[in-house]
Amino acid sequence: MVQKQPQSCQTPYKTTCGGQALIEGIMMQGPEKRAVVVRRPDGGLEVQTTPVKRGQGLRTLPFFRGIWVFLGSMVNGVKALMYSAQISDDGSVEEEPSALERWLEAHVPQEKAASALITLSAALGIAFSVFLFILLPTAITGLIGKVWTTMPLWVRAVVEGVVKVGVFLLYLYLCSRMKEMRRVFRYHGAEHKAIYCYERGLALTVEHVRAQPCHHPRCGTSFLFVVIMVSIFLSIVIFTPLKVENTLLRMGLHLLLLPVIVGVTYEFNRYVGRHDGAVCRLLRAPGMWMQNFTTFEPDDGMIEVAIRALEEVIPQEQGADRW
């Protein structure tokens, strides 16, 4: 018999429900539904809920499911971000449409144009991340190799890893200093707090949610950090024995290895997120620390948005969202 789900786990457990901070809102996804909740300029909440398509075949198998989840999260995240920007816009700033926008309105159906824009935005987002966190550090290390001509390959892999971490930290720091991004990161904190509250079996109230921690072990920031760590490890164990010295070849191999890196990272995060032993806490500690840049304390209004988003995706059958 299907039991109606209350506003808490009742018996605490880790949930598969998770989300993403938006502009004045939060996207939350559960096993059955995806919800986007955005604070309108008039103070009300705009709620959009859609069913989640279940994976089939390879999409459900370890390693392959990580690639599917990553691509889906990029597309759905961009779609939700664009939606939140539209809903939260108070119309105070009017922009003249560009020539390209006028041409698209006149020649391309609105739905097709929106779909193409979302796909393009997701592709550009992935391309930017790959360039910034993988290709750029490889190029910088190649330039260092031009000066340090006797640098051993294993040292080159380590230097490349240090540059990757440095670029990642600098990127997070600069984002955290931007006023607009800090507000998004406060919604990020609200999302984490709501999930913690639910996982601890507490009723989803502002008071209960406010008392929870901002940092969560299954955060996307931690995922990105582990992606970098896995890429460093693979650089050492693959590029060094094969004596891959050419910078362009190393870049190409990094691109080929990207699906492997994403698949391995997803399974790693699932494992350490499910267990609370000393080793797992140690493994996820760097990613938790990284959240100091991307997660800040929310106000009560942000917490209300997080609660509403989470309530929309909690499955009717209790435990169906167990991690």
Image: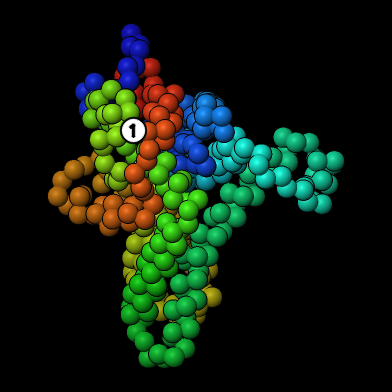
Residue 256, percent across and down? 50, 61
Residue identified by numbered label 1: 194
Residue 242, percent across and down? 40, 75
Total of numbered circles in the picture? Answer: 1
252 relative to 319, above or below? below
118 relative to 290, above or below? above
Q: Residues within 10 Å of mark 1 (few under 14, many from 20)?
A: many
Residue pushed farthest left?
A: 278
220 relative to 147, above or below? above
Left/right placement of residue 59 relative to residue 12 reads: right
At x 69%, y 40%, the residue is 114
The quarter of the displayed image where residue 208 is located: top left
Residue 63 visible, this angle: no
Residue 299, percent across and down? 38, 38
At x 45%, y 42%, the residue is 21
Image quadrant containing the C terminus = top left
Q: Nearer the viewer, residue 124 or 178?
A: 178
Residue 76, percent across and down? 54, 39
At x 21%, y 23%, the residue is 11
At x 42%, y 26%, the residue is 308
Left/right placement of residue 239 relative to residue 75 reads: left
Amino acid residing under circle 1: Ala
Label 1, secondary structure: give it.
helix
Q: Nearer the viewer, residue 201 or 137?
A: 201
Q: Nearer the viewer, residue 310 or 44?
A: 44
Left/right placement of residue 232 relative to residue 181 reads: left
Residue 269 visible, this angle: yes
